[in-house]
Amino acid sequence: MASFTSSGAVSQPRRSFGQVLKSYFYWQYKRGSVHYDVMVTLILLFIFVTPHLWNFGAMPMPISVLEHPIEVTGYGTHGLLVTVRASDVNIPDGASVREVKERLRNAIEPVAGDAVFVERWITTTDAQGHLVWKVWAHR
């Protein structure tokens, strides 16, 4: 049975906590009401506080620091000839072709970009007599 206030308005019966949560879930409040403001505040808190509390692992990739400069020359329309000092690329003896290709790609990625494809490579010496990798790649 509904009760009346002193002004003659009908007062609503008290709702349980579960009913209030259900009405929050189904968004049953009008704009400007206290419950609407509480819902909006909770949503904004979630949006702005969660990234600080939750580690998404979104860290920039570490860039390998090379001790010697890399020489890049173009060939063809999208091709690159990249010369990198062998001491800057850690390739163990007996490494597979796939492993060599991946390590050379990682070495030239800072200058060629992450969408680079290694076609072929050779080892040779530069003008100063240092052992270098000559890598043909394209984007």
Image (tube, rainbow, N blue to C red):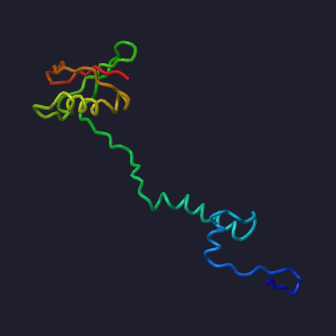
Q: Is residue 1 above or below residue 65?
A: below
- Farthest residue, direction front: 1
In the rendered image, the quadrant that contains the N terminus is bottom right
Question: Measured from the top left, where is residue 88 in percent x and y?
Answer: 21, 33
Residue name at image x 29 percent, y 19 percent: 81
Left or right: 20 in relation to 128 = right
- Farthest residue, direction left: 93
Question: Measured from the top left, where is residue 51 in percent x and y?
Answer: 48, 57
Residue name at image x 64 percent, y 73 percent: 19
Q: Quadrant of residue 125?
A: top left
Left or right: 34 in relation to 71 = right
| Total residue callouts | 0
Question: Measured from the top left, where is residue 5 in percent x and y?
Answer: 84, 85
Left or right: 105 in relation to 128 = right
Q: Quadrant of residue 90?
A: top left
Q: Is residue 57 above or below residue 108?
A: below
Q: Is residue 60 above or below residue 127?
A: below
Give the camera-side residue of 67 and 27: 27
